[in-house]
Image (cartoon, grey):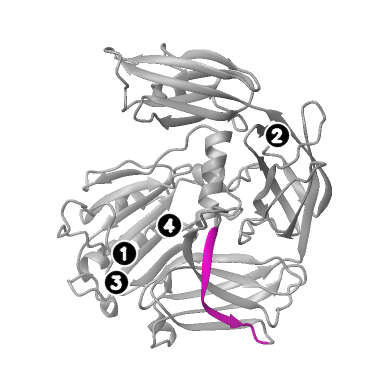
Amino acid sequence: MKPASDCTISLFRPEIVLGLLLVLLFASAAPALIMVQKGNEPTQDHNWPAGSLDVANLKTRLGFWEGPPFGGGQYCFEYRGDTAAFQAALDAFARIKAPKLELSVHEGPRESFILKDPKDPNADARLDWSFTVWNPESWNRLYNKQGNAWNAEDPNFGKPLAAPHMDVWVGGKDGGVDWSKVKVPQNVTVDDDRATSHGYKDGSAIVGDVYDIGTSKPIAGATITIQRNKGQDKKTLKYVYETVLEAKTDDAGHFELKAIPEGTFQVIASASGVASRAVGYEGFGKNTFRKYTVKLSAGASIGGQIKDTDGKPVAGTHVRADAIVGPDGLGYAVPDRPETVTDAEGKFTIDGLPRGHCQLFAYDDHHFLLDGLKVHEVPSTDVALKVTATGSIKVKVVKLDGSPATDAQVSVEREGGPKVGNWGGSANVKPDGTFQFDQVPPAKYLVSINPGLLLQNKDPDAKAIEVKAGKTVEVEFTKK
């Protein structure tokens, strides 16, 4: 797994990304997007450890971005220069006052997405090193806030604040950093993720150890599988994976996989009697090394019944386990996204989960799950879920001449402002200037074609509506 502060956009499994987007669309206000800034104009301190600002504002900086896209607070600064310039940056990094300072060494070359220009394939986007630092308030809100489990499967969930971190890419052909000439200060911890640095000469490699999370004993005979994403199945819409490489753990629970091809792969750990676990979803180059410590929980299931607001069982509703947390309180990413469908009596059972807890997401074409953020113990057999029948909102936007405003964006928020657990959404209109929001729970809403103003509760042109079960509310705007 990449370090928690690695200056890359996290490679979530696609199905996890889908789950997060669903939560964000239907359960909370729109998240902050990644903010990008080119150049080296001085930036400001954002509650960073002392000394961080000096590194952030080095003249060798190419630009920086703030993420992650689901909350913000992670600042990543990118730089270019020779060995002497990197040494100066590393020495400045070592002067930061923090409990721990981390440096990761990677095989180069590396390109910056900030500098890539799709209109100019010859644009120089070379990146030599980066510096990542977090705003503690943002980190704790995302990963350690009590009751916040929507991102439980993020590798950072439940962990202490990430240390200030530098990444350097070496071995490129066009100048850059000569690692053999770099002197690392004593207070900087180095992680070299080049396979050749760990004795592997034939490409990338993965090693690790597998333990039982309940007994702390090693698991012999566990299977470690490297899988490639082949895309979605058109019928089931589930992601399909093919096995690229596979290995078994020895009696000590240790495994080794060598000569891993280039690409992005999902790494799965499985064994008899336990819940399978997705332990990594990462990119591998020609010379990449990864080391995992895998903890597997005994398998368990969760079951119960879904009823509507009239107390009648609801059949044919999909139920999915989300925000899965293991018995150690950390996220537990289960492959294949555990899901089932309620029977004629509204009953369901989901197998293949670890012991711990999870949230349940129930959906069909005509119902919305109430109290969807509630946390449920695993194992359980008597979970009671309640859904409400939904309605629709059809929005039409026209120009002053009556023609469709094809560039319009529409937003809907619950009256009283966005709140976690409430439905809300936004979308670009279709070519005919319309968009219909379906599966909207009954309530009073504000509809706007000025999303930014709506989030600030400052849109004087927002229209108040009330959605009722089984009904469609039509709203029309004229865009000036």
| Camera-nearest label, 4 or 1 | 4
User: In the figure, residue 142 lies in which quadrant?
Assistant: top right
Locate residue 3, reporting x and y percent: 47, 63
- Mark 3 or 1: in front is 3
**Range of the magenta residues?**
239-250
Who comes first in sequence, dot 2 or dot 1? Answer: 1
**Residue 119 screen position, x and y as percent:** 17, 51
Q: Which residue is mark 4?
A: 164
Q: Which mark is residue 91?
A: 1
Which quadrant holds residue 297? bottom right
- Most extreme residue toward the front is 235
Q: Which residue is mark 2?
A: 371
Task: Give the mark nearer the N terminus: 3 vs 1.
Answer: 1
The majority secondary structure of the magenta stretch comes to strand
Q: Nearer the viewer, residue 147 or 234?
A: 234
Residue in front for this viewpoint, 154 or 449:
449
